[in-house]
């Protein structure tokens, strides 16, 4: 082995990361990472979300208005406000893309989004209160404009538009990034149903004693 390629630059214990920014993962290709999208009054997850929970066909969608974090919480079909995030096609689970005009409008209003844009948010699997779920920082979005050409149907651009607070920087300063990693998963969440449905008496009874971690709106 070449000795020159095996040398390590020793920076010492006093090396300071404070002047560094942690490059946002949105700046890299991430087709294998969990992600959700809001586009044209539709909400959908990608296949990577399903792969994180291979035995889960239903989730609850939880929104924290204070921290602007969304969580997808695995649940049973009979649970109140359960959302079928996948279907079966050719023997395989495939993400669904349901129309959800009210949910879409609520999100656009809360986040100040442009309803003509497509918004994509990366997520991470998390563990809290003995449960596994997917969490998404709604303030860290990739935005894609819908471009209209005369005589043609509007299409969503493949080139993302950077949020204003992302411009001129690669990511959060190192210290701020490290401090932002801890969040309280269930504090302040509201549960949303993607499709309008009238819960049955059995659904309501199944929720008895389960309302401590989240609350409906």
Image: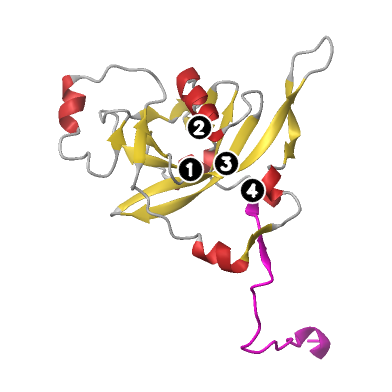
Q: CA distance from mark 3 to mark 1?
A: 12 Å
The image shows residue 108 at horizontal and vertical percentages of 55, 28
Q: Do the residues under discs 2 and 4 have CB atoms within 8 angstroms?
A: no
- Disc marking residue 42: none
Give the number of the mark in front: 1 or 4: 1
Q: Secondary structure at mark 1?
A: loop
For the residue carrying disc 3, how many other residues have a C-alpha within 10 Å: few (<14), some (14-19), or many (20+)? many
The mark that comes first in sequence, 4 or 3, is 4
Residue 193 or 138: which is nearer the viewer? 138
Q: Residue at x 42, y 53 (%)?
A: 126
- Image: magenta residue range: 1-25
User: Which residue appears at 37% of the width and 54% of the height?
Assistant: 184
In the rendered structure, find residue 68 and report the number of the disc placed on it. Answer: 1
Q: Is residue 212 left or right of residue 24?
A: left
Inter-mark Cα distance, 1 to 2: 9 Å
Closer to viewer: mark 3 or mark 1: 1
Q: Earlier in the sequence, mark 3 or mark 2?
A: 2
What's the distance in space between the residues labelled 1 and 4, CA to CA?
A: 22 Å
| 66 vs 17: above or below | above
Q: Are marks 1 and 2 in contact (CB under 8 Å)?
A: yes
Q: Is residue 8 magenta?
A: yes
For disc 4, the marked residue is 30
Mark 3 sits on what residue?
Answer: 121
N-terminal of the two: label 1 or label 2? 1
State how far apart marks 4 and 3 are (Cα). Answer: 11 Å
Report the predominant secondary structure element of the magenta stretch. loop
Kindly identify which residue carries mark 2: 110
Q: Give x and y (percent) for residue 61.
A: 40, 35
Q: Who is closer to the viewer here, 18 or 196?
A: 18
């Amino acid at each position: 082995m070449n000795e020159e390629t095996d040398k390590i630059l020793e920076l010492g214990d006093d090396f300071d990361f404070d002047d560094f920014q942690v490059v946002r993962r949105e700046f890299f290709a991430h087709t294998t990472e969990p992600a959700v999208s809001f586009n044209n009054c539709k909400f959908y997850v990608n296949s990577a979300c399903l792969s994180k929970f291979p035995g889960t066909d239903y989730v609850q969608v939880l929104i924290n208005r204070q921290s602007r974090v969304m969580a997808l919480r695995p649940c049973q079909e009979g649970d109140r406000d359960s959302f079928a995030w996948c279907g079966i096609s050719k023997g395989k689970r495939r993400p669904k893309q349901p129309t959800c005009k009210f949910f879409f409008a609520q999100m656009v209003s809360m986040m100040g989004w442009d309803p003509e844009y497509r918004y994509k948010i990366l997520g991470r699997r998390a563990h809290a209160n003995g449960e596994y779920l997917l969490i998404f920082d709604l303030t860290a979005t990739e935005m894609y404009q819908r471009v209209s050409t005369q005589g043609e149907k509007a299409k969503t651009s493949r080139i993302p538009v950077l949020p204003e607070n992302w411009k001129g920087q690669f990511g959060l300063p190192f210290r701020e990034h490290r401090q932002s990693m801890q969040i309280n998963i269930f504090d302040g969440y509201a549960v949303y149903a993607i499709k309008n449905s009238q819960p049955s008496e059995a659904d309501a009874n199944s929720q008895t004693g389960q309302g401590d971690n989240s609350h409906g709106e």
